[in-house]
Image (cartoon, rainbow, N blue to C red):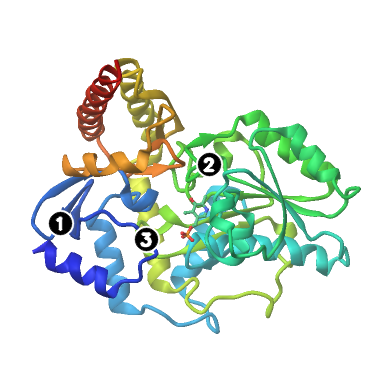
């Protein structure tokens, strides 16, 4: 059955992705089921999107109820769910205003426009430069792409923004970048509290607090990209809360609506007037269906005390992945991450992307981050038993890699 689909996929879908040869049809909790009926344990969760798992009954009910009421009205009018969601997110984040769009890249686009226009409106026309970090990922639209710190993603697309990229974790480099043109031209520093796509690299608390201090001193803003780390992923509802740092604005997307497309920007009251009517907007942004899906996620997180359990589940996964590092030292280098955003770092020479099909064959879905990191971003509702099963499955594949490696090494003698 999947063969026909796979043929049609090659004929009709644009070839900008490199999808695995599996066609999914259904999901239940932490499992996905393909068109042949085979079940897979999902440690990808649509790349940290399906926070409450697949087809959670409350989520399904809330989204269906909203679809039956009204899906879209445009921003020429208010809608109830939009207002309710803005209030909930502001209350829980300590921020003051919310803007909604449809994706992570769009949310970061909003952050960049917010920073630029904030200074423009104040008559500070020099502040047009951004400081971002090597290996950072901020999205694929031209503005977000310019902020993204992996040169191969940017190649051939120019740079829509003026950006200085510096090593992640290096405060001295940030100070030097701030002063690069004599100072006074940096609108904002943009940072992820854990670099997700870049290889699951958590920032230290000192680094994030240091950025805040440097930016404040220079009169620049701190923008935190919480597209992947937000909505409980790191053990607090937002990654900046884990670090105890106060941003000027935050971007959200991925887990926010549990699988329904949405993006969001939260700002302080000081920035509430930086983008007045006419300067930014989105036709779909903040529509009642997307907002109802996000409200359903918050309702489930509350009802099942999910965020409080993330640290414990994350520690369990980290320990179990640590066992793999100890058991297969010739294949694995280390494990790192925060909460339920975890990476198993492979030794140089191994390519994470090439190992994924072996895991898929055994019914396990994980993703690669950077070149040699296997990334685990399970639904936050995952059980310890499911995490254990994922690790056991990974162990089988690592054993296979170790045996293959021994064979090639001994063949060399
Ligand atoms: C995924 C991601 C984005 C881009 O989100 P899209 O919805 O794909 O546009 C931006 N920033 C971070 C940190 C991400 O992980």
Give how far across and how far down residue 103 sits, in percent. 48, 63
Question: Which residue is painted at 16% across and 39% down in the image?
Answer: 362
| Residue reaching furthest to the front | 413
Of the pair 56 and 357, the residue shown nearer to us: 357
- Residue 272 seen anywhere in this rendered image of the structure: yes
Look at mark 1 in the image and give the residue it sits on: 34
Vertical arrangement, residue 354 with respect to residue 63, above or below: above
Give SS at disc 3. loop
Vertical arrangement, residue 239 with respect to residue 123, above or below: above
Give SS at disc 2. strand
Question: Which residue is painted at 56% across and 62% down in the image?
Answer: 107
- Label 1 environment density (alpha carbons within 10 Å; few <14, some 14–19, many ≥20): some
Give the mark, 1 or 2, whose residue is nearer the N terminus.
1
Question: Which residue is painted at 50% across and 52% down in the image?
Answer: 227
Look at mark 3 in the image and give the residue it sits on: 17
Give SS at disc 1. strand
């Amino acid at each position: 059955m999947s063969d026909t689909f796979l043929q049609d996929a090659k004929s009709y879908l644009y070839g900008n992705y490199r999808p695995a040869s599996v066609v999914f049809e259904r999901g239940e909790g932490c499992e996905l089921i393909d068109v042949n009926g085979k079940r897979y344990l999902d440690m990808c969760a649509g790349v940290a999107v399906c926070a409450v798992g697949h087809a959670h009954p409350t989520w399904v009910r809330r989204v269906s109820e909203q679809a039956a009421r009204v899906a879209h009205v445009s921003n020429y009018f208010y809608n109830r769910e939009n207002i309710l969601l803005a209030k909930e997110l502001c209350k829980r984040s300590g921020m003051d205003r919310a803007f909604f769009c449809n994706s992570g890249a769009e949310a970061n686009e909003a952050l960049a426009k917010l920073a630029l226009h904030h200074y423009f409106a104040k008559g500070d026309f020099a502040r047009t430069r951004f400081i971002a970090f090597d290996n950072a990922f901020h999205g694929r639209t031209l503005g977000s792409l310019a902020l993204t710190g992996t040169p191969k993603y940017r190649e051939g697309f120019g740079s829509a923004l003026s950006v200085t990229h510096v090593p992640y974790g290096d405060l001295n480099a940030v100070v030097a970048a701030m002063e690069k043109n004599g100072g006074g031209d940096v609108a904002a520093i943009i940072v992820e509290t854990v670099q997700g796509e870049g290889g699951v690299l958590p920032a230290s608390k000192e680094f994030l607090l240091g950025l805040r201090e440097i930016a404040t001193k220079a009169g620049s803003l701190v923008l935190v990209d919480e597209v992947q780390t937000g909505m409980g992923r790191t053990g607090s509802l937002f990654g900046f809360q884990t670090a105890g740092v106060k941003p000027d604005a935050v971007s959200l997307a991925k887990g926010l609506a549990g699988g329904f497309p949405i993006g969001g920007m939260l700002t302080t009251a000081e920035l509430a007037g930086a983008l007045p009517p006419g300067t930014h907007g989105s036709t779909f942004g903040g529509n009642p269906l997307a907002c109802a899906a996000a409200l359903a996620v918050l309702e489930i997180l509350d009802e099942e005390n999910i965020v409080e359990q993330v640290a414990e589940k994350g520690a369990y996964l980290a320990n179990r992945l640590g066992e793999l590092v100890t058991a297969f030292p010739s294949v694995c280098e280390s494990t790192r991450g925060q909460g339920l955003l975890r990476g198993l770092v492979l030794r140089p020479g191994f390519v994470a992307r090439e190992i994924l099909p072996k895991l898929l064959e055994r019914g396990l879905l994980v993703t690669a981050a950077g070149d040699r990191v296997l990334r685990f971003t399970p639904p936050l509702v995952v059980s310890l038993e499911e995490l254990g099963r994922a690790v056991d499955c990974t162990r089988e594949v690592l054993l296979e890699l170790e045996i293959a490696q021994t064979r090639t090494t001994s063949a060399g003698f």
